[in-house]
Image (spheres, rainbow, N blue to C red):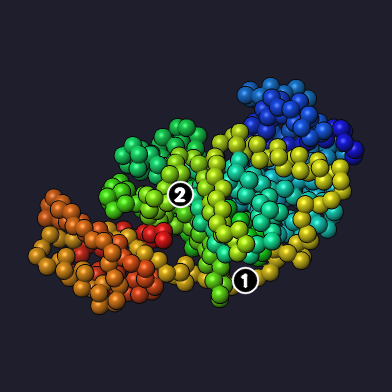
Amino acid sequence: MSSGETVKVGMLGMGTVGGGVAAILQRNGSLLARKTGIKLELQRVLVRDPSRRRAVDLPPQIYTTDPEMVVKDPSIDVVVELMGGIEPARTLISAALKENKFVVTANKDLMARHGQELLQLAYCYGEDIFFEASVGGGIPLIRPLKHCLVANRIERMVGIINGTTNYILTRMSLDDMDFQEALSKAQELGFAEADPSNDLEGRDAAYKLTILAGLAFDCSLNPDDLFTQGISGVTRADIHYARELGYTIKLLAVAEQMPTGLALGVHPALVPLTHPLATVYDEFNAIFIKGDLIGETMFYGRGAGALPTASAVVADIIDAAYSLQSGVKDRPSPGKSNNRKITLLPLSALSSRFYVRLQARDLPGVFGAVATAFGEEEVSLDMIIQKRKTNGMAEIVLVTHDVNEERFYRSLKRVARLPAIEPEPGVFRVLG
């Protein structure tokens, strides 16, 4: 393929992101050709129902219900998988690679669970997989890790990488909505699925963190091994108390290289109002990456939505087209990189501050007994407040200083055994 030639694209799926890709190619096709010298042509699109009305008007002959019309069409140069899920996406991507086609995907679930397998297959067949859109929507994260930051030893990553939960927590914080009301609003605007459990329970963020950490720390990871805690336990009261104490609550993805291994996980955390992550609102994402050479750098942008994600997909299609022109692949052999095993540490390997919300019977001496129980385990309290409640109950809210997690939970068990304390306290980490 020489400069100025047409690159023909086959697309598997025409949902929200697929529609965005088609819209970009229609709207900005001439701009892309002028900037890159490459004309992108949508040759074939796999859909369930070709007769369904869509926001983007394409010629009817482009649509097919037969996946082989996409993956085995000899005229198609790049196959774009936007179906989501594991199967049949995994099988179809494998088939496309075996047909000597480059692949672009936005499928975080698939790349988190089977990315190494598919990258190895691509290498064996002399092809490549581009997956920038699998993490962070329109924010460039994969390319910087593979290219711009490659000279660095990455030491730490922390950030917000799920737009749905960030939108919900933003509305709870800024508009004083309760959890269910904020979730309904997110669904109404298309930021949350009809079944939002993957987002709410932190699994979506865990998939994305698996992909990012695999690249950043040059290792092979399984998302099932990550500590994952969602936001369903965050209450309106927690949001209020956090703000009173100088914090907001965000769902964070955290990865940190320790001398003995890699600690990583997904969990809600109190973030100081002075921290840049505290002002990342709605569906926006942001992630800090700390390297030994560059120090700390931050990536910020829209982490959800049709056009931001489609923008990353189109950028990957252009990269695939450049590779077709030059014959140069985007990555080294996965046999030489991103395939080493690493000791995965529990998040308890990291010291942390903790926020605790306790329900207690409003009796004399309870406040002091709680403080004593923590003190006996050498857990130092930074802030502690007591709120009077109705029906003879009070809430005690406290924040610890930095403490080893094992020691913290040992002290919390002591507190839970106090006769005036109700079970099931609210507990969240505090970002240092």
Residue 298 position in % (x across, y down): 55, 50
Q: Is residue 258 left or right of residue 69?
A: left
| Residue furthest left as drawn | 364
Secondary element at image label 1: loop
Where on the picture, by quarter, is residue 84? top right
Residue 197, horizontal then vertical, whole percent: 47, 48
Q: Residue at x 41, y 61 (%)?
A: 432
Determine which of the numbered discs, if any, sits on residue 91 in the image.
none
Q: Position of residue 171 (x, y in %)?
A: 38, 39
Query: Amino acid type of disc 2?
Result: Leu
Secondary structure type for disc 2:
helix
In this rendering, position of residue 242 left or right of residue 268 = left
* In the depicted structure, whether residue 111 falls above or below residue 417: above
Q: Which mark is residue 277?
A: 2
Q: The N terminus appears in which quarter of the rendering?
A: top right
Q: Nearer the viewer, mark 2 or mark 1?
A: 2
Give the side of residue 112 with respect to residue 36, left or right.
Answer: left
Q: Which of the pair 337/47 is nearer the observer?
A: 337
> Mark 2 to mark 1: distance in Å?
29 Å
Q: Quadrant of residue 23?
A: top right
> For the point 68% across and 29% down, which residue is it?
24
